[in-house]
Image (tube, grey):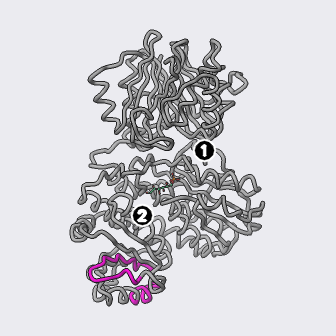
Amino acid sequence: MCGIVGYFGKREASSLLVEGLSKLEYRGYDSAGVAILNEGKLEVVKCKGRLANLEDKLQQKPVIGNMGIGHTRWATHGAPSDVNSHPHTNKKGTVSVVHNGIIENYISLREWLISKGYEFVSETDTEVIPNLVDYYYEGDLLKAVIKATEKMEGSYAIGVLTTHEPDKLVAVRHESPLVVGLGEEENFIASDIPAVLNQTRNVYLLEDKEFVVITKDGVKLYNRLEEEINKEVFHVTWDADAAEKGGYEHFMIKEIHEQPKAIKDTMASRIALGQPINLDDIHITKEQIKNLNKIYIVACGTAYHAGVVGKYVIEKLARIPVEIDIASEFKYRDPIIDENTLMIVISQSGETADTMSALRLAKYKGARVIAVTNVVGSSASREADDVLYTWAGPEIAVASTKAYVTQLIAMYIIALFFSQEKETLTSEEIENIKEEMLRLPEKAEEVLKYKETIQKFTTKTSKHKDMFFLGRGLDYAVAMEGSLKLKEISYIHSEAYAAGELKHGPIALIEEGTIVITMATQEELYDKMVSNIKEVSARGAKVYAFAQEGHTEIEKSVNSASYIPRVMDLLAPVIAIIPLQLFSYYMAIEKGCDVDKPRNLAKSVTVE
Ligand code: F6R
C-alpha cells in the first residue's frame, strides 16, 4: 500500500512530484523517493522516513528534469529502508518503476530473472518489475510493460520510465487505484485525485489493465492488446481546499467538525419529508428485496463498526436477517451465499483488499452487492452492482471520523428503503424517522460545542494505560468504535465490551481506579446499563457516562457524566460517537502523538 505519482511537461518535475506525494502520504509514509529523467539520464533520490526527509535530500542536491515518477511507501515486503524505497531500477539503471500493490508471484519471477542473469538488491516484490520490463524491452516501452504485466500476478498501479525513450511515461493499473491528470501541455499520473487537484480538474479514472502512455504530444490510452481506447474525461467539481486543513491544527479535528455537513450531504436528495426514499444509484427491485433470504454486511475496522449498527437497524426496521462479518474472515469460512443473498460492503476508500476479496467472492457466488463507499470511481464502486456514495468528502486523517458517521447514515437510508419496499413500517413511522434524521446535522453541531468539557475530562484521564468502553445494543457498537479511535491514535490500550458480558469474565480486570467509559443513550436499556455501571463502580472503577440530556440522575452512579442532545434511540450512534472521537483526539494531543498519521497505520489498506 503506497502512493504513486508521475509527471511529464514543461516544468521541473521534482517539486511537482513531491507536492503530489504530500497529498498521498495518507496511503503510507515510511519512505519516499523520486526518479527523474533528464536528457536520457535517470537520477533516483530516495530514503527511509517521511516525505520531509526526501525534501531535505532534494534541497541539498536538486535533480533537474521535466519528467519523473514518485512514491510514498507503506512497507509490505521488506522493512522500511533506503534500499527498499521506491523507485526501483534495474541494475543497468535503464528502467525505473514506482508501484502500489503486491506482486504475489514475485519469488518465482525473481528466481526466473536471476536464472537469466539479473541481480537484485532489495527485499521488495516491486524490484522484479523494472527487471521484467528490461527483459522484454525491444525498443517500445509500452509493449515491454504489457508483456511484463502478463507475467505479474497480484495487484499493481505502476509508473515506468526508461532511458531508452526519454520522452515517454507508461503506467497501468490492476486492482490498485490510478488516475491520469490532464493539464495544459503537461500531464500527471497519481494514485488518487487530491494529488493532482492543484494542477488540474480533468482526469481519466483508469480501469483494470488500461495502459496510459504520456508523451510530449499528450496522453493515449491502450488496452492489453495495444489497441487505443477512448475514455470520458471526469471533471472534478469538489474544492481543492476540501483536501487541506482549512485553519485547523489537524485533519482529524477538521474532519470531526465537518460531520454536520457530511451527514447533511449524505442525506440530501435521498431523504425528504413526504417523499419516498430516493435511491437512484441502487437498482435492486421490490421483488428482489422481498425475495432476499439474508444480507451480509462485510467491512473492516471502523467501517465494520458502522456495519454493526447496520445489522441492528436493518433487522429492526426491514425484518431481514443480517449477518455482519469482518472482511478478512469472511472469505475463509465458506459462507452460504446464493442469488437471493445480498451483500453490503462498507468501505471509505473502496480499495480495502480484504473487503474487495469478500465482494468478489459474493459476486462469484451469485449474490448482488451494494457498495457503500466514499470514493467515486473506487474499485468497490466499480465492481459492485449498486453504489451508495457517502458524501463525506476526502478523508485525510488516518483515523476515520466523518466517513464513519456518513456510513451510519447510509445504513439508516438502506434500512428505511428496504422497509419502504417491503412495507414493514407504515409511512407514518418512516416519516417520523426521516424527520428525526433531518435534525441530526443540527444535533451534531450542538455536541461539538461541548468540546472543552471533553478536553478537561481528557486531561484528568491521560495518565491511564488501560480503559474500558461499555454499552448495550447500539451503544455497544458505539463503544467498539470509541475504543478503536482511542487505541489507534493515542496508543492507550482499551477494550470495548457488551456491558452485560462483563460479568462473564472481563470484570476480573476491574480494580481500584480503572477507567470505564459507559454509554447509556438507549432508553430501553438504560436501567440495565445503570446496573452494569454499579457492578464496576463497586469494584473500584472510575466511571464516566454519556447519556441523553435529561438523565441527570445517572450522576449519582458515576464519577462524571456528559450528555448528548435528545435524539431517537435508533439514531443515537450518529451523535454519541462525536464526544468519543473528541476524547481520542484530545488524548492523542495530550500524549504528544502524531494524530493524523498514527504509527504502523495507513489510510487505505490494499493488502490482505
Ligand atoms: C480506523 C480506520 C480503519 C478503516 C479500515 C477500513 O479509524 O479508519 O479501521 O475503517 O481500514 O477502511 P475502508 O473503510 O477504507 O475500507
Beta carbon of the mark 1 residue lies under 8 A of ligand 1 = no
**Numbered circle sitting on residue 484:** 2
The quadrant holding residue 482 is bottom left
Residue 508 sits inside the magenta stretch: yes
Q: Dot 2, how many residues are within 10 Å of its Cα: few (below 14), some (14-19), or many (20+)?
A: many
Above or below for 539 versus 159: below
Which element is circle 2 on? helix
Between 125 and 6, which is closer to the camera in this rendering? 125
Residue 144 left/right relative to 122: right
Where does the image place residue 329, in percent across and percent down from the top left?
Answer: 61, 61
Q: Is residue 592 above or below residue 7?
A: below
Q: Residues within 10 Å of mark 1 (few under 14, many from 20)?
A: many
Nearer-the-camera pick, 182 or 157: 157
* Picture residue at 32% right of the left edge, 62% below the top: 582
Determine contact: label 2, label 1, CB under 8 Å: no
The location of residue 164, given as percent across then percent down, is: 55, 12
At x 54%, y 24%, the residue is 160
Q: Is residue 411 left or right of residue 27?
A: right
Q: Quadrant of residue 564?
A: bottom left
For the record, the magenta segment spans 507-531
* Labelled disc at residue 379: 1
Amino acid type of the residue that numbered disc 1 sits on in the rendered structure: Ser
Under circle 1, the secondary element is: helix
In the drawing, what numbered circle is on residue 358? none
Identify which residue, 432 or 469, lies in the foreground. Answer: 469
- The image position of residue 526, as x and y in percent, is 43, 85
Is residue 126 within the magenta segment? no
Residue at (61, 53) in percent of width and height: 371
Q: Give the amino acid at mark 2.
A: Leu
Q: First in sequence, mark 2 or 1: give its number.
A: 1
Nearer the camera: disc 2 or disc 1:
2
Q: Is mark 2 within 8 Å of ligand 1?
A: yes
